[in-house]
Image (cartoon, helix red, strand yellow):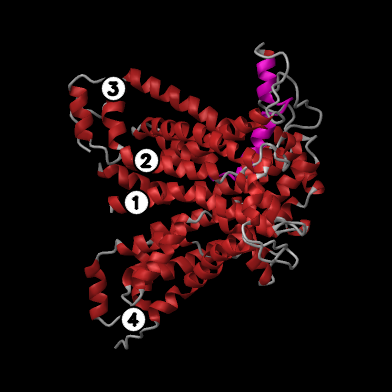
């Protein structure tokens, strides 16, 4: 016979709750507190008011990082909202061997961003295969400096993010497509609507909510970019450090014994502020759904 | 599925050709770069990898680059380090998320709504926002520059707790009610009724915890300073910075980091795609 013990649920929750407090709640609060100090990795940490925040206003690297973020978002959002949907429609039909294609298209997602960036770094190298082919076919007389020009490096990193993200969003669209009514498709087909017409008048409206969700996910993801830019620029942040992202700046100031934890924390708060908008929008969307 | 002669599901031969052509084009785009890297890693030193007409199939395939990269950086011990971190993270998430997910879904207790709300609230917090403060904490606990320090913050991820809760919630209440009437304890309900019914979600949590830990770069980069303790991703970026003159070695290194994850995913993907297909069949 059971003697119901009130503490059993708490016992089961305890490990996760400890992690929630120690690695989520406390760091979140501490980030805000540190952002008002001049803390260094070794001791220090006087309260300096809004010093770190006013310092941001004169930080040219931060301005560059924010510009990079905006470019990242503006390019990634439409591409990663549309292309994975087309892919999902392509792998939707149960053709022979389709399972293989689905898995293959997902491969870039499971690879580490480091692995992917090293592979693309080699493809985009001055003497790599992309420049080599373009020169051989006569498109270029000199190699394009994909990895050493500010904007080309940014575009390269963005292409890499898009390429790596295709399979991930394809999967999300695939489960959404399952819920698009087949009767609607059939009815449209009977009425003589071609595949393109059906895509825009049946498929797209059917996955509208998923599209919104994905738009938000990509916006936040674009603001959090790190590994692609770090590896492609070999940790330098590109020519003159102008290809830094916000997270690269956080890592730059937060890491090592010479770091500046206070400023890194203020940048972290900034990152939270720019990502929270899309996130809250998503949370509202979810609540409506359920 | 029953099909009428000219049903919606029949695909004309022309459409088939178009579809397969497109599938192959996308295949080249998504998988081609990996194959190119694999090919580079197998090319011998005598083969010029920089020519304008590089060949896709190595002329004299060799594994010597894999031996060579191990002489340059301790790549196998880096792989071992990554594996240790991944095992700790997988174990932590499988256990921690299952226990908490079960309690939140199936046990009634005072304050459960509040706890659930707190777990949900963490989802709007990108991990990069707290990464510096997490480092301060891990250092305070004495785990800076250690593999435990790398594994610790991700060892129970809040998203996984919520995923497991969702899985437990989908178990019908009357199945559970019978066990309660029979006098089963919470523990017995978890083992006998809960676990067999959440295998699918648990596999997803395991796969993604492993991939997350194995692929992670920013956090180990911040935590680790001793080159002996590097995980594969940090070691590879170090290799890239030092020896970028020989792409064959970097290619071999990336393949060592990439192939294990492909094998694991290939072995476990059916659990992953089953969920996707289940959703697809419904429509």
Q: CA distance from mark 4 to mark 2?
A: 43 Å
Distance CA(mark 3)–CA(mark 1): 31 Å
- The picture places residue B4, in percent across and down from the top left corner, at 18, 29
Sequence-first tag of 1 and 2: 2
Q: Give the residue number, with chain letter if any, for mark 3.
A: A197
Does B251 lie within the magenta span?
A: no
Magenta stretch, main secondary structure, is helix
**Residue for badge 4:** B185
**For the residues marked 1 and 2, what is the alpha-carbon distance in whole angstroms?**
12 Å
Give the mark, 3 or 2, whose residue is nearer the N terminus.
3
Nearer the observer: mark 3 or 2; the answer is 2
Q: Is residue B81 visible?
A: no
SS under mark 4: loop
- Count residues near mark 1 (Cα–Cα under 10 Å), then give few for <14, some for 14-19, many for 20+: few
The residue located at (60%, 43%) in the rendering is: A113
Q: Whole-percent x and y of residue B272?
A: 42, 49
A248 on left or right of B45: left
Residue A111 in the magenta stretch? The answer is yes
Q: Chain of mark 3?
A: A
Report x, y in % for residue B127: 55, 55
Q: Are marks 3 and 2 in contact (CB under 8 Å)?
A: no
Label 2: which residue? A212
Magenta-colored span: A110-135
Q: Which mark is residue A108?
A: none
Q: Which mark is residue A284?
A: 1
The answer for how far apart the CA atoms under marks 3 and 2 are is 21 Å
User: Which of the 4 quarters of the picture holds residue B150?
Assistant: bottom right
């Amino acid at each position: 016979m059971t003697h119901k013990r009130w503490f059993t649920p708490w016992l089961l929750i305890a490990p996760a709750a400890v992690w929630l407090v120690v690695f989520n709640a406390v760091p979140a609060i501490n980030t805000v507190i540190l952002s008002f100090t001049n803390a260094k990795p070794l001791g220090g940490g006087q309260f300096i008011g809004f010093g770190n925040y006013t310092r941001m206003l004169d930080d040219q690297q931060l301005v560059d990082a924010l510009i990079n973020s905006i470019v990242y978002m503006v390019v990634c959002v439409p591409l990663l909202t549309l292309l994975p949907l087309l892919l999902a429609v392509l792998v939707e039909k149960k053709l022979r061997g389709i399972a293989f294609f689905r898995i293959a298209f997902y491969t870039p997602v499971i690879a580490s961003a480091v692995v992917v960036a090293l592979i693309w770094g080699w493809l985009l190298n001055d003497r790599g295969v992309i420049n080599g082919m373009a020169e051989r076919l006569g498109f270029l007389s000199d190699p394009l400096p994909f990895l050493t020009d500010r904007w080309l490096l940014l575009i390269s990193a963005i292409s890499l993010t898009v390429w790596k993200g295709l399979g991930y969003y394809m999967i999300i669209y695939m489960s959404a497509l399952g819920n698009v009514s087949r009767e609607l498709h059939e009815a449209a087909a009977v009425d003589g609507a071609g595949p393109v017409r059906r895509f825009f008048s049946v498929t797209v409206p059917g996955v509208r909510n998923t599209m919104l969700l994905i738009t938000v996910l990509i916006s936040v993801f674009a603001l959090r970019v790190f590994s692609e830019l770090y590896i492609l620029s070999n940790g330098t942040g590109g020519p003159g450090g102008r290809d830094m992202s916000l997270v690269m700046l956080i890592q730059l100031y937060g890491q090592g014994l010479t770091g500046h934890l206070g400023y890194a924390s203020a940048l972290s708060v900034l990152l939270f502020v720019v990502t929270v908008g899309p996130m809250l929008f998503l949370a509202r969307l979810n609540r409506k759904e359920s | 599925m029953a099909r009428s002669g000219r049903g919606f599901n029949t695909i004309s031969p022309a459409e088939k050709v178009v579809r397969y052509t497109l599938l192959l084009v996308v295949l080249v785009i998504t998988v081609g770069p990996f194959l190119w890297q694999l090919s580079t890693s197998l090319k011998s030193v005598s083969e010029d990898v920089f020519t304008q007409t590089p060949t896709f199939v190595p002329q004299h395939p060799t594994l010597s680059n894999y031996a060579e990269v191990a002489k340059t950086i301790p790549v196998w011990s880096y792989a071992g380090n990554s594996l240790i971190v991944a095992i700790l993270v997988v174990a932590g998430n499988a256990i921690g998320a299952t226990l908490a997910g079960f309690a939140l879904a199936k046990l009634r207790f005072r304050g459960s709504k509040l706890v659930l709300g707190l777990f949900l609230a963490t989802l709007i917090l990108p991990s990069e926002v707290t990464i510096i403060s997490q480092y301060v904490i891990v250092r305070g606990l004495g785990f800076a520059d250690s593999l435990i320090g790398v594994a610790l913050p991700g060892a129970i991820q809040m998203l996984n707790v919520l995923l497991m809760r969702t899985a437990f919630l989908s178990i019908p209440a009357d199945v559970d009610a019978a066990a309660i009437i029979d006098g089963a304890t919470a523990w017995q309900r978890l083992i006998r009724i809960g676990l067999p019914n959440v295998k699918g979600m648990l596999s997803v949590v395991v796969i993604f915890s492993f991939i997350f830990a194995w692929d992670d770069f920013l956090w180990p980069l911040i935590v680790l300073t001793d080159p002996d303790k590097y995980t594969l991703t940090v070691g590879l970026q170090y290799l890239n910075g030092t020896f970028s003159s020989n792409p064959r070695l970097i290619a071999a290194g990336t393949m060592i980091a990439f192939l294990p994850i492909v094998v694991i995913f290939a072995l476990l993907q059916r659990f992953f795609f089953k969920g996707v297909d289940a959703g697809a069949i419904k429509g």
